[in-house]
């Protein structure tokens, strides 16, 4: 009997893609439902191959899908160059995938989430978690020093809190970093950082995105590096530059990759 397989894995791809704001509706149109004959293994294998090929075509995704027919397992794995932690949202999505396969194809299909070392961190069979590995943090996120995207690389070297040169009481978090333009077009460091990251501080009632603060930096502070903040840097070139954010209070600043808001990169900086 033919049954429809619902594709919940598309939602996971949307959560963990480097261009999360991109409209994927047209790209995925026509593969949201696919009919397969659950009694024929060949059709199941062909279905998963077609499905995974469609999903893996998104080069911006931070994860990759594959199907192991020998164990009837759909494998969700982080790519070699990224870290995608097993959050509650991701865990719930994988359980939802398993439940969909059980109801639409039948029992006996596993879904696994694996890290880049091919270690199974989560295994779900027929909607129930059968294995979960509690992993230690591989690194203290507050010690992260590099944010890397497809187009740019930022190596954070030094953080200082400075008073505004205008004597208006404002304070800035001033960052010295190495900026590498890996894109095919000239791009200034500030715009590249805005495309790639967000800096936030918490208040008593909200989380505030910080504005740029380079115009407040004292004229005597690393003038050559400060002057490069809006200079278009050629492709395949690295420069030392100073960038700044205007602080709203004395709470720590969180600098996170813009696409996953901290799953790929996060650095917390004390400003007191």
Image (cartoon, rainbow, N blue to C red):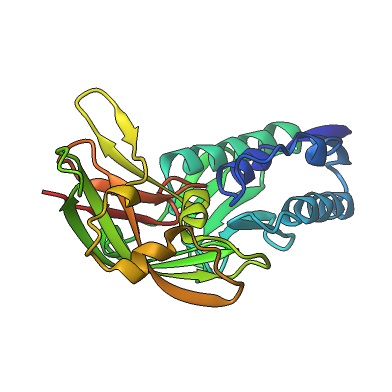
Which of the 4 image quarters holds residue 234? Answer: bottom right
Q: Is residue 73 above or below residue 202?
A: below
> Which residue reaches farthest left?
272
Which of the 4 image quarters holds residue 168? Answer: top left
At horizontal 83% and vertical 42% (from top left) the residue drawn is 38
Q: Is residue 145 visible?
A: no
- Relative to 26, 224 lies left or right: left
- Relative to 255, 203 lies left or right: left
Between 142 and 93, the residue placed more toward the observer is 142
- Relative to 255, 14 lies left or right: right
At horizontal 67% and vertical 60% (from top left) the residue drawn is 71
Q: Is residue 166 above or below residue 182?
A: above
Between 104 and 94, the residue placed more toward the observer is 94
Q: Residue 268: x, y in percent?
A: 26, 52
Q: Residue 236: x, y in percent?
A: 59, 76
> Which residue reaches farthest bottom?
237
Q: Residue 86: x, y in percent?
A: 44, 50
Quadrant containing the N terminus in the rendered view: top right
At horizontal 56% and vertical 54% (from top left) the residue drawn is 112
Between 223 and 205, the residue placed more toward the observer is 223
- Relative to 132, 24 lies left or right: right
Q: Residue 85: x, y in percent?
A: 43, 53
Between 268 and 211, the residue placed more toward the observer is 211
At horizontal 19% and vertical 40% (from top left) the residue drawn is 170
Q: Is residue 197 visible?
A: yes
Which of the 4 image quarters holds residue 63? Answer: bottom right
């Amino acid at each position: 009997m033919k049954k429809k397989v619902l594709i919940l894995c598309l939602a996971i791809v949307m959560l963990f893609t480097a261009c999360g704001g991109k409209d994927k509706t047209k790209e995925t149109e026509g593969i949201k439902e696919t009919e397969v004959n659950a009694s024929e293994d060949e059709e199941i294998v062909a279905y998963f191959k077609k499905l995974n090929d469609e999903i893996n075509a998104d080069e911006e995704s931070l994860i990759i899908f594959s199907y192991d027919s020998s164990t009837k397992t759909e494998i969700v794995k982080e790519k070699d160059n990224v870290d995608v932690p097993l959050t509650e949202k991701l865990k719930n999505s994988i359980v939802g995938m398993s439940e969909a396969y059980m109801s639409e194809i039948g029992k006996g299909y596993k879904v696994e989430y694996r890290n880049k070392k091919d270690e199974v961190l989560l295994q779900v069979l027929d909607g129930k978690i059968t294995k979960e590995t509690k992993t230690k943090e591989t690194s203290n996120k507050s010690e992260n020093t590099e944010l890397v995207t497809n187009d740019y690389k930022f190596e954070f070297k030094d953080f200082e809190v400075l008073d505004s040169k205008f004597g208006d009481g404002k304070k800035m978090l001033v960052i010295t970093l190495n900026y590498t333009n890996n894109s095919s077009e000239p791009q200034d460091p500030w715009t590249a950082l805005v495309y790639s990251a967000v800096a936030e501080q918490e208040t008593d009632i909200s989380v505030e995105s910080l504005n740029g603060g380079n115009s407040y930096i004292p004229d005597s502070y690393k003038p050559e590096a400060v002057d490069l903040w809006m200079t278009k840097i050629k492709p395949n070139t690295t420069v030392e530059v100073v960038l700044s954010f205007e602080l709203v209070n004395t709470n720590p600043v969180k600098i996170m990759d813009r696409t996953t808001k901290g799953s790929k990169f996060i650095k917390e900086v004390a400003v007191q």
